[in-house]
Image (spheres, rainbow, N blue to C red):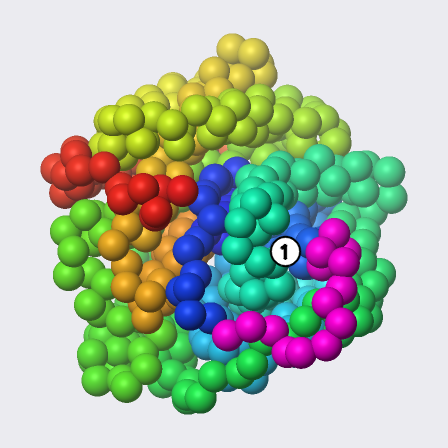
Amino acid sequence: MPTPSTPLPGPGNGPASASVPVPIPSGDPAPEAGPRPRLGAVLIVIVTAYLMVGVDSTVVNVALPRIQQDLDFTPTGLSWVLNAYTLAFGGLLLLGGRVGDIAGRRRTLTAGVLVFAVASLLGGLAGDGGLLLAARAAQGLGSALIAPNTLALLTTNFPEGPRRHHALGVYATMGTIGASLGLVLGGMLTDWASWRWALLINVPIGAVVALALPRVVAEPPRHAGHFDAAGALTGTLGMSSLVYAFIRVSQNGWTDARSLLGFSAAAALLAGFTIVESRAVQPIMPLRLFADRNRAGAYAGVLLVPAGMFGAFYFLTLISQQVLGYSPLRAGIAFLPMTLMAVLTLRFVPRLVQRHGPKPLLVTGTTLLALAGGWLWRLDPGDGYASGLLGPLVLVGLGIGMCMMPLNATILTAVTPRDAGSASGLLQTLQWLGGTLGLSVLVTVFGTATRHATGPGATVLVDGSARAFGVGALIALAALLVTAFAITGRKPAPASAS
């Protein structure tokens, strides 16, 4: 689960991913002239906007069984409730940052919050699955406008020094806890009211943030430039086609004509995206970012780590409620050991990276993630929470805590000022797309394993999920090989690591 670069997924970014503050070019223009608002109010408004994104990456997860019951989703089709959000978010994230540079960051952030709030209202009132999926995609669009511009506004509204460092620390912490807060909050609202309130709660919060932004946050000057619409379109459609094809396979098998058409369209669109980016004057994904071996390897790790873990949380959410009989609230609380381990690990990781470099932590972290997937691969219908789920969740928390900050630091080391925004935007994009693609692959494995299965529903769910967990373990193993052989042992430069 992947979360944005200061989170995530989530499921997403995975349900709880950690990150470091993204360095911003030092030559960023000062905000517009005028009375400077109190920085405490600026921080509250910006962080609240960003927290909406982190919370909503997981807030519907524990509500999925209720949503499936009310809107008649199939088990594989239900994954689109998550994928519709993460695909739009990840696919448009790079463009969202560029829109803020040109149209104005505060203006873009305000527009993103309003889109997010309206989409939440429509999703909360949805009477059928199609409208809910459309609303979730619109939420992803709003998040893509929110995430990159919150960080940019923090750096332009806070002066260099301790105040900015404190603001960035609060921002990073919110990214870390947002996904877990979403699980607990979603469980509470689903248990005490309805799954619809997991979406409707965003409406009053979004309205307050949208009203406060122009009154509290100063707007920095805009930059000249143009949108890479062709890159955003081909990239988003290519990834959407690939995910659609995988989920179609899970329902209809590998001989399905639409599945094969989806794979063909994805290959053509992603090839076109690469060509467009190689020729664009201001690409949303500069290909020169992959010229450095360590950065290219870290980007591969950022894609693979949530790809292996994001889908696991989808199945664990279903197992905790449909097999263990947990309420939505109890299911959300069941994930807290993972979050606590990730947060505790993060307290020591920056110091260890400075002393030993990122590679030892990356190898250890990906090893723990592979072990967690292997443990879940052995899951049995008779296992309880303590015997079957608690141990893997602890290993996942440790693994994510050890992986994400070193990966981020490796990516952002030695990035030129002109590429700092693109490098961090691509980092967030790969986190979300990795989680989305990983979920679609694991759902395909589940659907293939259970399409002709017979027996009690709980047994079928656990057996099919175990197969998916096994593939997740193999993806984590691929991340281990990347970190072991593609990334060198060099330490990040002090400025980037900080």
Q: Determine which residue is flagged by label 1.
A: 50
Residue at 33% x, 66% y is 417
Q: Nearer the viewer, residue 328 or 47?
A: 47
Q: Position of residue 141 (x, y in %)?
A: 57, 70
Q: Quadrant of the C terminus?
A: top left
Left or right of residue 230, residue 138 in this image: right
Q: Is residue 246 above or below residue 274?
A: above
Say if the magenta span includes residue 73: no
Left or right of residue 369, residue 298 in this image: left
Residue at 86% x, 38% y is 192
Residue 479 lies in quadrant: top left
Query: Which portion, as a residue range, is magenta?
Result: 29-42
Q: Is residue 295 visible?
A: yes
Residue 214 lies in quadrant: bottom right
Say if the magenta span includes residue 30: yes
> Which residue appears farthest toward the top when viewing the image?
387
